[in-house]
Amino acid sequence: MPKMKTRKAAAKRFKQTGTGKFRRNRANGRHILTKKSSKRKRRLRKDAEVKSSELGRLRAALPYGV
């Protein structure tokens, strides 16, 4: 059986932690930053964990992890 292909778009956007969870970047942190508060911009810098409801799709997209 041939190897499964990795979805490259997903591989560029997600990181896998040592325990197997996936981390993602938060949305809305790229532009139009003047109207956003410093507290909000600081929170947008941090990674977020991928929700459990999305993990099935993500594991299908990344069959060998990241």
Image (cartoon, grey):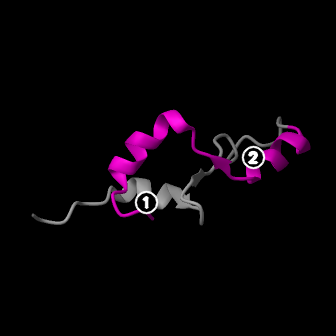
* Residue with the most extreme right position: 38
Q: Residue extending furthest left?
A: 1
Q: Is residue 42 left or right of residue 51?
A: right
Q: Decide: marks 1, 2 in contact (CB < 8 A)?
A: no
- Residue at (35%, 50%) from the top-left corner? 61
Residue 32 versus residue 3 in the image, above or below: above
Report which residue position mark 1 lands on.
11
* Residue 19, image quadrant: bottom right
Mark 1 / mark 2, whichever is N-terminal = 1
Q: Amino acid at mark 1?
A: Ala
Of circles 1 and 2, the one toward us is 1
Instruction: Judge whether residue 44 is colored magenta.
Output: yes
Question: Where does the magenta region start and end?
Answer: 37-66
Mark 2 sits on what residue? Answer: 44
Mark number, residue 52: none
Q: Nearer the viewer, residue 54 or 32?
A: 54
- Residue at (57% x, 54% y) in the render: 21
User: Is 39 within the magenta?
Assistant: yes
Callout 2 amino acid: Leu
Toward the front, the furthest residue is 19
User: Does 20 sit left or right of 64 as displayed?
Assistant: right
Q: Tag 1's secondary structure?
A: helix
Q: Quadrant of the C terminus?
A: bottom left
Q: Position of residue 57 (x, y in %)?
A: 38, 41
Q: How many marks?
A: 2
Q: Position of residue 7 (x, y in %)?
A: 33, 55
57 above or below 8? above
